[in-house]
Image: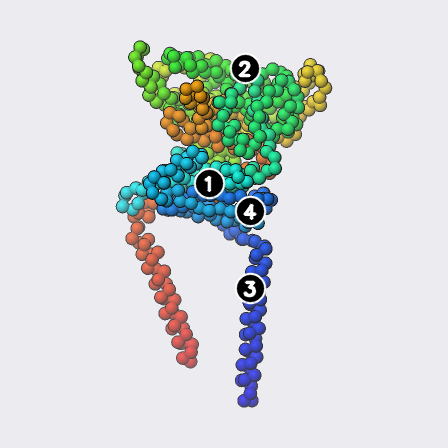
Amino acid sequence: MNNMPQRILKTLKRKNITSLLVALAAILLLNFFARYYYFRIDLTSDERYTVAEVSKKIIKNLDDIVFIRIYLDGEMPVTMKKFQQSVREKLEELSNYSDSNLQFEFRNPAEGSEAERDAVYSELSKKGLIPLIVQENDIQGGTTQRLIFPGVIVNYKGKEFIINLVQDNPLYSVEENLNFAQQNLEYNFVSVIEQISRDKKPLVAFIEGHDELGDYDLGDIMLELANYYAVERVTLNGNIGILDDFKAAVIAKPMQKWSEEDKLVIDQYIMNGGRTAWFLDAVYIHEDSLSRGDMTLGLVCEHNLNDQLFRYGVRINANVIQDLQCAVWPVNFAPQGMPPDFRPVHWPYFSLLIPPGDNPVTKGLNLIRSQYPGVIDTVGLGNNVKKTFLLNSSDRSKITNAPLLISLRQIEDGYSQMGFNQSYLPVAALLEGIFESPFRNRMLSQYNHGQAFDFKSQSQETKMIIVSDGDIIRNDVVRRGSRVIPYPLGVDKYTGQVYGNKEFVKNIINYLADENDLMQIRNYDYMLRLLDKSKVAGNHTLIILVNTILPVMLVLLSAIVFLWWRKRRYAR
C-alpha cells in the first residue's frame, strides 16, 4: 500500500514524458511539411488574401528571378503606411508560390541629402514613375504634404518594367484611390510577370493605309505596348488572312474611306476569332481653322465603317458631345495684329469621360480626356452579343448634331448650364459574343485578289471594343527644332494633369489579347471601411483612454481574478 503512490507517480511521469515526446514529434512533423506545402486560410468576407489560381500558375512557371523594387519606405502618412503593408503582404503571398524566383525589396527614395533626393526623384520620373502628393490633416488642424512615388520597377533578365500602383483620380478621395490600388495589386504584379516571362511576345497590329494616326501620334502607346507585345503597322491591301497571327488589331482614327476589300479582311479576321479595338471619329473637326480664326465646321467623317459596325451591333452617331466637365484648351485672346496672348479656358468639346468602376477594363481608372467625342449606341442586331458601355460623359452634357458650327465666341458668351441637361452619354462599348458577317449573301469572287478563301458568315466567340473618339489613343507631340517628340499619352501638355488614357488603352489591349482571363482579377472588390473623421476628432481623448488605459485595466483585473480563484481553490 505504501508503494502505491510511488507507482502512480512513475506512471504519471511516463505519461507526461510520452505526451511531451508526441507533441514535439507532431511539431517537428508539422514544420517539415510546412516547408514543402504552403497553405493559408482566408477568413475575410471579400477574400482579399486569396490568390487566384491563374496567378499561382503563372508564378509557379517562372524560370528565372523576377526582382521587384518598391519605392514605398521611410516617413509617410498613415494611409500610405497601410498601403505599403498591403503591398508587402501581397508580394509575400505571391512569392510563396514562386520557388524563390520572386524577390522584392522596399526603398526610401527620400533618403540622403537634398541633392541626392532630388537626383533620385528626377531619375524615377524619367523612368516613368508618377509621383503623388499626399496631404494629411492632423488633429490640431494643420496639414502635412509629402511627395510619394507609389510605384515599382520590375527587373527580369536585364530588362526593366514600370508599374504605377496608384491612380490619382480626382473623382475619389485618397482612401478610395488607395483602395482601388489595393484591389489591383495582384493584377498589376501578375500581369507584368506573365507578359515579361513569355517565350514569345504576342503580335498586335495597328492598321494603316486609310490615313490612320501615324507613328508620332501613336508613339507613346506603341512604345509602352512594345514592352509586352510585338507591335507592327500592317497595311491590309485586301489580303484576307494577313492578320491571322495577331492577337489583336487596332484601328486608330482613319480619316480616309475604307475599301470593301479591306473591310472584308478585318471582317474575316473577326469571324475567325480575332479581337479588334476601334477608335473612330464620327465628326471631323478642323482645329487649325479655330487657331487661325474664331470658327470652324464639323462635318460627318466618311470612313465607310458604319454599316459594318451596325451589323456587329453598334452605331456611332454623327454628333458631338459638349460637357461642362471638360479639359482646358489654350485660346488666343489678343486682338488681331497684336502679339499672341494664349490663356487656358475650359473647352466643353474636350469632355472628361467617366470610366465605370464595375468593369475590369475601366475599374479604378482616372478620368479619360477626349476631343470632340460622339455618342455611341447599341442596336438590335447581334442578338448573340453582350454589350457593355465603358465610358460616359458627365451628368451636365448636351449633343450637337453634324454638320455643326464651332465658334470661340462660346467662350466669350459663357456657357449656360440650362442647355447641358443630358446625362452620362456613352462614348465606348465592349461587345462580346458571336458576330454575324455583313458580307454574308454577297458575291465575293472579286475579293482577295480573285483567290479562293474559306469565307465564314458567323464568328467564333470573340470580343471587340469601339470608342467614338479617335483622339483618346492619340498623344500630343512637342517640336524641338526639327525633332518631333511624342508626349506621354494622357498627359495634358498645357496643365500637366495626368488622365487615364494610357491605362485605358493598355487595359483594352490586355483584355483583348488575354488568353488566361487574367483581367478578371481586376473584378476583386474590397470593402472600404473608413473611420468617421468628425467622430474621431470629437472623441479624441476618449479614444486614447480606451485604447491605452482600458487594455491595461483588463490585464490587471484578469490577474486579480486569477489570484483570487487560485487562493480559494488551494485554501480548501
Q: In the figure, is residue 387 to the left or right of 453?
A: left
Q: In the figure, is residue 567 to the left or right of 13?
A: left
Q: Which mark is residue 101?
A: 4
Callout 4: SS: loop
- Residue 115 percent location from the top left of the image: 34, 39
Disc 1 to disc 3, how far (Cα)?
Answer: 39 Å
Say which residue label 1 marks: 152
Please, what is the three-letter code of the amino acid marked with disc 4? Asn
Residue at 31%, 42% in the rendered image: 144
Disc 4 to disc 3, how far (Cα)?
Answer: 28 Å
Dot 4: few (<14), some (14–19), or many (≥20) neighbours within 10 Å? Answer: some
Dot 2: few (<14), some (14–19), or many (≥20) neighbours within 10 Å? Answer: some
Q: In the figure, is residue 280 to the left or right of 170?
A: right
Picture quadrant of residue 176: top left
User: Does the rendering let one see residue 396?
Assistant: no
Labels 1, 3: front one: 1
User: Does the rendering let one see residue 403?
Assistant: yes
- Give the mark nearest the N terminus, 1 or 3: 3
Please, what is the three-letter code of the amino acid marked with disc 3? Ile
Disc 2 to disc 1, how far (Cα)?
Answer: 42 Å
Labels 2, 1: front one: 1
Q: Is residue 299 above or below residue 12?
A: above
Dot 1: few (<14), some (14–19), or many (≥20) neighbours within 10 Å? Answer: many
Say which residue label 3 marks: 27
